[in-house]
């Protein structure tokens, strides 16, 4: 099972988050049948959203939305405090030649656009408060840099973000995925910040050590070097959607009796697709008749 940890260092002046998300990204790629480059973009966004969501409280929800002008069109990821995340790309077939170093050209399919973070509180309780929406221009399209730029410019938290997805041409298709987010809080020692920056600059690729069996703690040790840290929380994470057949029926019911009657007569049923997980729900003629009776 994938895991995420949340910790602190330097007397609480540095916040730490790291996660292994290999199975999570594998499930997302399986459901959406994304191209390799789109898989890397989606995987990085899902992982970054989980890391950013460690500050969520019960019944909160965080959504990262990337409105991209590139071939991918956009990326959406949504996470909750229980470690669940779901998401999709608008064009799963987006592709681009790899860079000269062999890496996926994620920035090539993302292009310019806007990076949004939406924080909602109490949504699942029916408390529809106005959400907090922060946004910044996309600065690189490589996703990790865009998370860091958002944190520094919208939430005024200088941060280092590393995200990686390693793919191969055989099963399992996603062989490694994970990330690290280090946030410098007020009062952080400049010398320690410089040490972390230098350690990260010379660290091996995250995916290489994840592929060798690294745990989230190992990723933090890789990023922090000799700086000690304390783990405050550890939790399992997974790709999980909250859609269901019951929700599909509720949505159709909300259309009203005349609309449902029209669907029954013209289409002899209904098909509901969930964009987040690609699940499909089919309602038969009998299902629609029951809905009409309930209305």
Image (cartoon, grey):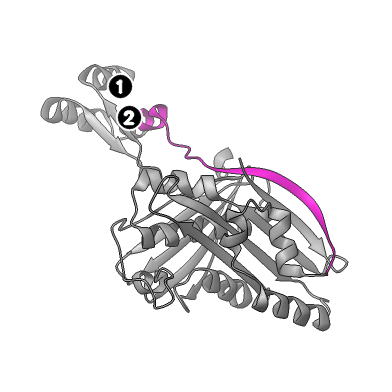
For the point 57% across and 44% down, the residue is: 127
- Which quadrant of the rendered structure holds the C terminus? top left
* Horizontal arrangement in the rendering, residue 132 relative to residue 229 (left or right): left
* Horizontal arrangement in the rendering, residue 165 relative to residue 288 (left or right): right
- Asked which quadrant contains residue 201, the reply is bottom right
Which region of the structure is painted magenta?
Answer: 227-250
- Is residue 237 inside the magenta stretch? yes
- Give the labeled residue for mark 2: 253
Kindly state the secondary structure of the residue where label 2 is placed. helix
- Picture coordinates of residue 281 (x, y %)? 31, 31
- Asked which quadrant contains residue 205, the reply is bottom right
| Mark linked to residue 291 | 1
- Picture coordinates of residue 81 (x, y %)? 64, 46
- Is residue 18 inside the magenta stretch? no
Pick whichever, 166 or 125, lies toward us: 166
For the point 49% across and 59% down, the residue is: 166
Answer whether labels 2 and 1 touch (C-beta < 8 Å).
yes
Residue 91 in view of the camera: yes
* Horizontal arrangement in the rendering, residue 9 relative to residue 35 (left or right): right
- Which quadrant of the rendered structure holds the N terminus? top right
């Amino acid at each position: 099972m994938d895991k995420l940890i949340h910790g602190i260092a330097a007397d609480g002046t540095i916040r730490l988050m790291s996660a292994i998300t290999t199975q999570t990204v594998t499930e997302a790629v399986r459901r959406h049948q994304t191209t390799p480059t789109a898989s890397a973009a989606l995987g990085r966004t899902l992982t970054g959203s989980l890391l950013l969501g460690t500050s969520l409280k019960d019944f909160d929800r965080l959504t990262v939305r990337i409105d991209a002008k590139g071939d991918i069109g956009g990326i959406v990821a949504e996470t909750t405090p229980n470690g669940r995340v779901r998401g999709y790309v608008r064009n799963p077939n987006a592709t681009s030649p790899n860079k000269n170093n062999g890496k996926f050209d994620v920035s090539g399919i993302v292009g310019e656009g806007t990076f949004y973070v939406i924080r909602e509180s109490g949504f699942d309780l029916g408390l529809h408060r106005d959400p907090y929406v922060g946004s910044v221009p996309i600065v690189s399209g490589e996703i990790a840099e865009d998370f860091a730029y958002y944190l520094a410019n919208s939430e005024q938290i200088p941060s280092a973000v590393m995200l990686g997805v390693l793919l191969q041409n055989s099963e399992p298709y996603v062989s490694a995925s994970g990330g690290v987010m280090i946030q410098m809080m007020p009062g952080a020692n400049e010398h320690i910040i410089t040490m972390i920056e230098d350690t990260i600059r010379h660290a091996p690729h995250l995916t290489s050590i994840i592929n060798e069996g690294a745990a989230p703690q190992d990723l933090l040790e890789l990023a922090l070097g000799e700086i000690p840290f304390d783990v405050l929380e550890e939790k399992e994470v997974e790709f999980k959607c909250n859609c269901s057949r019951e929700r599909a029926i509720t949505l159709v019911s909300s259309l009203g009796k005349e609309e449902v009657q029209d669907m029954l007569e013209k289409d002899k049923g209904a098909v509901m697709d969930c964009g987040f997980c690609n699940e499909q729900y089919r309602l038969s003629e009998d299902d629609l008749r029951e809905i009409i009776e309930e209305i």
